[in-house]
Image: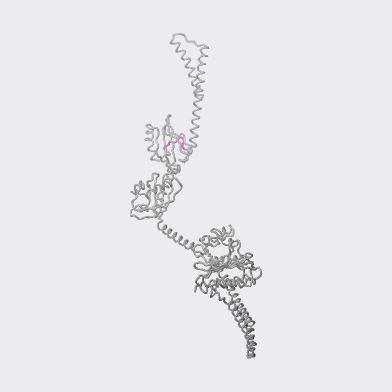
């Protein structure tokens, strides 16, 4: 840079002196050169030289910055950058260009660019340069000869610079073309795969037009691909069901994927059901370019599922209609299914909320059985062992009776466990409520004991009555007959004495009257004649009047039947019922008041005996104190039942007792 400035100073100084001489010659004066003139000229030359130096320095700095920027950009560029002079010799090649060609910078600089081009493109280089005279830039593909001998495909953009040099920027297309080739192969394989898929497969663009489909899809629409591609569903089949395809396709574009079940009726009218999966397709910029779909024919599957669902619903309805409690457990004892009877029983009889939670679906049968409130440990252990034996295959079936103590009562169940031989195995556990059977067995045992006691009591009463009757016959009628015999014998001895005979006969007459009276009393106690003559109302009134009552005890009698008569069996049963109830009250109740009532209904007669005595617990077991009462009541109940009537007893300790019976007016035969 300093050399041009010095040259300018020398030329400028010489020119100033020469200019003064020329001007002096033109003016015709004598040329003379003074110190002042020299200083002015040198000052002018110095100032202009300094200005020239500043201008050139700034331009050099700017060019250096520009060159440095160009070099930095070129060095970092991924594309190859080559700068050639007017003779097409390489004056610069960046690292990317060196990598593309395989040559180092010193191997490229100074050599013609034609040396690294293929023969074909080297021959076209002259025409290319000529074209740059007319066009600002040209973009085309070149083949570069790599140092190692292979060809490199490059997309090159060339332009001629103002100074006459040439700039070439090239992108290596080798990987791109290799990727394109690989993509083409993948596309071919994908097309082959799609064509081999038995399910209909298609692809739509964002407008809903088909851009690809396989033979299965052509078969579904019964159209060749030429009549499907670049057309929408409405173009192919303008029906209502095709609208669902378009709509679902747009939805698939807005989401990751969409799975729907749709029905489709083909041109022949056949209705088929499909599970359609549609997924969006994006380009490398994540822009939606289409939707791909695949339709799987699920017609047979849907029919099978519907049949299976119907079968399940039928089985569930049958199981839920059963009163037997059923639960299915897996191999580990987890409850996987229960019927309504199981759920109802758990809800109605759970002692605490925890019991309910331990017996529902998802709970463990073993855990719930071990920790259930009120369960018998020994019974629970036996049940668990039986269930485990069935689950382990050690026994084909397990059954046992088990008691369940609930807040309201004690329930009994027959537990049955059978193996489940389908799927992953398990067992079916059923509970049949046998509480009524157990209650009936208990009641039967109680009735058996009562009937046995009643039979013994009946025999005892019969023997006592016989003994009492025998004693009365012996003590009263026997003695009277003996006295009568003696009187008659005395009368025989005094046949001739009229007065003595008359006295003896009077005594005999009194004895006979006493025998008749005693016989009548015995007969009335065995069966009051008033019952047959006047009916139950008069008979009971007579019976109550002739009772031997303890001091302070009062018996009141109320009736509205007056002289009404009923069948003989009904009147006799009613009389004995009241007689037995009064006897029990007098002997055991320690009552101070007894009320006897008879009420007549249109079709029945109702009797009741109520006392204010000490009462008793009718549900307590029999003991020596109330056995007599219970047996008497059993006798009353049996009389009522045999006639088709209704019997009722109400008693609690210290609240008195009320015995009531309703008999049909006409006895059942």
Looking at the image, residue 126 lies above or below residue 395: above
Q: Is most of the magenta stretch helix, strand or loop?
A: loop
Residue nearest the viewer, comparing 345 with 504: 504
Q: Which residues are magenta?
A: 108-113
Question: Residue extending furthest top?
Answer: 29
Front residue of 587 and 518:
518
| Percent position of residue 544, x then y | 60, 71
Query: Where on the picture, by quarter, is residue 586?
Result: bottom right
111 is within the stretch colored magenta: yes
Residue 198 on the magenta span? no
**What colour scheme has been applied to the protein in the rendered image?**
one colour
Q: Position of residue 205 (x, y in %)?
A: 39, 45
- Spot occupied by residue 644 in the image (x, y as percentages of width and height): 51, 71
Q: Is residue 506 visible?
A: yes
Location of residue 404 with respect to 73 vertically, above or below:
below
Q: Position of residue 70 (x, y in %)?
A: 48, 33
Please say whether residue 648 is visible from this viewpoint.
no
Question: Does 114 appear above or below 322?
Answer: above
Decide which of 104, 386 is in the foreground and name it. 386
Q: Is residue 130 left or right of residue 369?
A: left
Q: Is residue 577 above or below residue 258?
A: below
Q: Residue furthest right?
A: 551
In the image, is 660 to the left or to the right of 20? right
Q: Nearer the viewer, residue 192 or 143?
A: 192
- How many marks the image carries: the answer is 0
Quarter where residue 289 is shown: top left
């Amino acid at each position: 840079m300093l050399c041009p400035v010095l040259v300018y100073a020398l030329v400028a100084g010489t020119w100033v002196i020469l200019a003064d001489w020329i001007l002096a010659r033109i003016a015709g004066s004598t040329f003379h050169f003074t110190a002042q003139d020299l200083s002015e000229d040198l000052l002018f030359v110095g100032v202009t030289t300094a200005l020239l130096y500043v201008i050139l320095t700034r331009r050099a700095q700017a060019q250096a910055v520009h060159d440095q920027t160009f070099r930095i950009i070129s060095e970092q560029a991924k594309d190859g950058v080559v700068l050639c002079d007017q003779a097409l010799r390489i004056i610069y090649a960046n690292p990317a260009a060196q990598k593309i060609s395989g040559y180092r910078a010193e191997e490229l600089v100074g050599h013609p660019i034609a040396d690294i081009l293929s023969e074909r493109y080297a021959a076209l280089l002259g025409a290319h340069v000529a074209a740059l005279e007319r066009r600002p830039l040209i973009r085309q593909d070149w083949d570069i000869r790599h140092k190692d001998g292979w060809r490199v495909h490059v997309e090159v953009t060339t332009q001629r610079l103002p100074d006459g040099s040439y700039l070439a920027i090239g992108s290596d297309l080798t990987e791109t073309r290799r990727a394109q080739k690989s993509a083409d192969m993948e596309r071919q394989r994908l097309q082959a795969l799609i064509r081999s898929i038995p399910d209909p497969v298609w692809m739509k663009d964002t407008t809903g037009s088909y851009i690809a489909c396989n033979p299965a899809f052509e078969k579904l629409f019964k159209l060749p691909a030429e009549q499907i591609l670049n057309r929408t569903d409405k173009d192919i089949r303008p029906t209502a069901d095709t609208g669902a395809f378009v709509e679902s396709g747009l939805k698939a574009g807005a989401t990751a994927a969409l799975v729907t079940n749709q029905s489709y009726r083909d041109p022949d009218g056949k209705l088929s059901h499909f599970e359609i999966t549609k997924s969006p397709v994006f380009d490398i910029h994540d822009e939606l370019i289409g939707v791909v779909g695949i339709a799987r024919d699920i017609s047979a599957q849907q029919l099978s599922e519907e049949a299976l669902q119907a079968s399940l619903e039928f089985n569930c309805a049958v199981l839920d209609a059963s009163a037997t409690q059923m639960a299915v457990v897996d191999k580990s004892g987890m409850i996987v299914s229960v019927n309504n009877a199981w759920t109802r029983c758990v809800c109605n009889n759970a002692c605490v909320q925890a019991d309910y939670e331990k017996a529902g679906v998802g709970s463990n049968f073993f855990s719930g059985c071990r920790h259930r409130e009120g369960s018998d440990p020994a019974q629970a252990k036996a049940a668990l062992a039986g269930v485990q034996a069935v689950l382990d295959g050690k026994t084909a079936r397990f059954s046992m009776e088990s008691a369940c103590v609930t807040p309201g009562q004690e329930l009994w169940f027959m537990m049955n466990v059978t193996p489940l031989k389908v799927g992953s195995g398990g067992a079916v556990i059923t509970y049949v409520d046998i509480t009524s059977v157990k209650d009936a067995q208990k009641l039967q045992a109680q009735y058996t004991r009562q009937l046995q006691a009643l039979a013994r009591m009946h025999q005892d009463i019969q023997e006592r009555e016989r003994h009492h009757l025998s004693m009365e016959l012996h003590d009263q009628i026997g003695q009277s007959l003996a006295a009568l015999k003696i009187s008659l014998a005395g009368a025989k001895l005094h046949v001739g004495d009229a007065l003595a005979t008359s006295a003896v006969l009077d005594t005999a007459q009194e004895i006979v009257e006493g025998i008749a009276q005693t016989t009548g009393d015995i007969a009335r106690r065995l069966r009051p004649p008033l019952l047959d003559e006047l009916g139950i109302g008069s008979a009971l009134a007579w019976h109550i009047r002739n009772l031997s009552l303890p001091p302070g005890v009062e018996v009141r009698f109320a009736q509205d039947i007056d002289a009404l008569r009923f069948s003989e069996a009904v009147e006799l049963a009613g009389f004995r019922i009241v007689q037995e109830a009064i006897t029990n009250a007098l002997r055991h109740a320690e009552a101070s008041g007894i009320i006897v009532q008879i009420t007549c209904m249109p079709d029945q007669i109702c009797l009741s005996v109520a006392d204010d005595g000490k009462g008793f617990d009718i549900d307590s077991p029999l003991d020596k104190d109330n056995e007599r009462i219970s047996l008497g009541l059993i006798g009353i109940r049996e009389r009522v039942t045999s006639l088709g009537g209704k019997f009722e007893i109400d008693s609690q300790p210290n609240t008195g007792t009320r015995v009531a019976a309703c008999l049909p007016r006409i006895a059942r035969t």
